[in-house]
Image (spheres, helix red, strand yellow):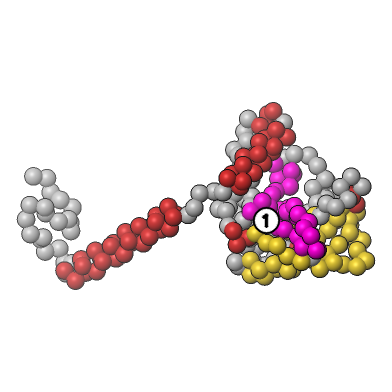
Amino acid sequence: MPARPPGALDPLGPPRSDGVNSGERISSRHRWCLVVRLAAVLLVAISCRGPLPAPELKYRQEREQAVKAALRPSEAGRFQGLRFYPFDPACRFRAMIEPIVPPETLRIAASNGEQRAAHRVGRVRLGFPNGTAVLTIFQLDDMRAEYPDALFLPFRDSGAGAETYGAGRYLEIERLAGGVVSLDFNRAYNPDCAYGITGQCPITPPENTVSFAIKAGEMMPAGHF
C-alpha cells in the first residue's frame, strides 16, 4: 500500500499519532461544519429571493436592446449586455418635490467638453437603505422646448468608478398629481457615453453626489473597469 502523507487518516484503521491531539481535530471539524452551514444559509437566502417582476424584466430587456441598437456594428458584436443590481423595492419612492422658485440657472459640464444650460427646479429628500439623500432636480434648456415637463435627475453614489459608472447615472422622473413625483432607482441608467455612444452626456453636478452606495439600477458596463 502506498504511503500516505503525514497527518492523513487511515480509513482501514485507527488514526495514527501525528502530533495533533483530538481536541484540535474536533475544533477543525467544528469550524468546517460552521462554514458548510453558513454556505447553506446563503444558498437558501438566494433561492428565496423572488423572481424579477415582469414589468422590470421587460424594461431591462428593452433597455439592453436599445443600447445595442445604438452601437456601431463593430461595437455591437463585442457588446456583453447590461449589468444590473438585484431588484430592490426599497429603492422606489413617491415624494413631494420641493420647488425652487424661481428656478436657478446654471451650466452643467458635458462629456464632450461643452457646457449645457440648465435650471434647478426642485429637490427631493429620499431615505435609502444605506442613508438619506437630498437630490436636486434639473431641466435641461436644450430639451425643454420639445419636452417641457421633462425632469432630469443625475446622481453619483459612493460606488462610482468601481461598481457604477464614474460620471454618474441618470433617472427619469414621473410627475404625479399634487406636486408628487415617482422615482424608481431600479431603473437608474448609465449615460450613452458609458457605452461609447457619442453624445453630450451631462456629468453629474457635485451637489448630487451621495456619500453611500445606491445598489439599484444599472451597474458599470461590462469590460469598463
State the image coordinates of residue 224 (x, y, percent, origin top left): 64, 45
Q: Kindly tell me whether residue 165 is visible in this rendering.
A: no
Q: Give 64 or 208, whichever is nearer the viewer.
A: 64
The residue depicted at 63 percent of the width and 53 percent of the height is 186
Residue 178 belongs to magenta span: yes
The residue depicted at 69 percent of the width and 38 percent of the height is 67
Q: Give 103 or 199, whichever is nearer the viewer.
A: 103
Judge from the rendering whether residue 82 lies leftward or rightward of residue 203; answer left or right.
left
Bin the neighbour count of mark 1 within 10 Å (Cα to Cα): few under 14, some 14-19, many 20 and up: some
Q: Give 208 or 183, whichever is nearer the viewer.
A: 183
Judge from the rendering whether residue 82 lies leftward or rightward of residue 13; answer left or right.
right
Q: Name the amino acid type tagged 1.
A: Asp
205 vs 59: above or below: below
Residue 184 belongs to magenta span: yes
Judge from the rendering whether residue 11 lies leftward or rightward of residue 150; answer left or right.
left
Could you tell me which secondary element the residue under label 1 belongs to? strand
For the N terminus, the image quarter is: top left
Image quarter of residue 136 = bottom right
The residue depicted at 66 percent of the width and 36 percent of the height is 65
State the image coordinates of residue 100 (x, y, percent, origin top left): 87, 67
Residue beneath label 1, please?
184
State the image coordinates of residue 29 (x, y, percent, origin top left): 24, 63
State the image coordinates of residue 101 (x, y, percent, origin top left): 91, 68
Span of residues in magenta:
166-195
Farthest residue toward the front?
A: 177
Q: Kindly tell me whether residue 145 is visible in this rendering.
A: yes
Farthest residue toward the top?
A: 73
Image quarter of residue 135 = bottom right
The residue depicted at 32 percent of the width and 61 percent of the height is 37
Farthest residue toward the left?
A: 13
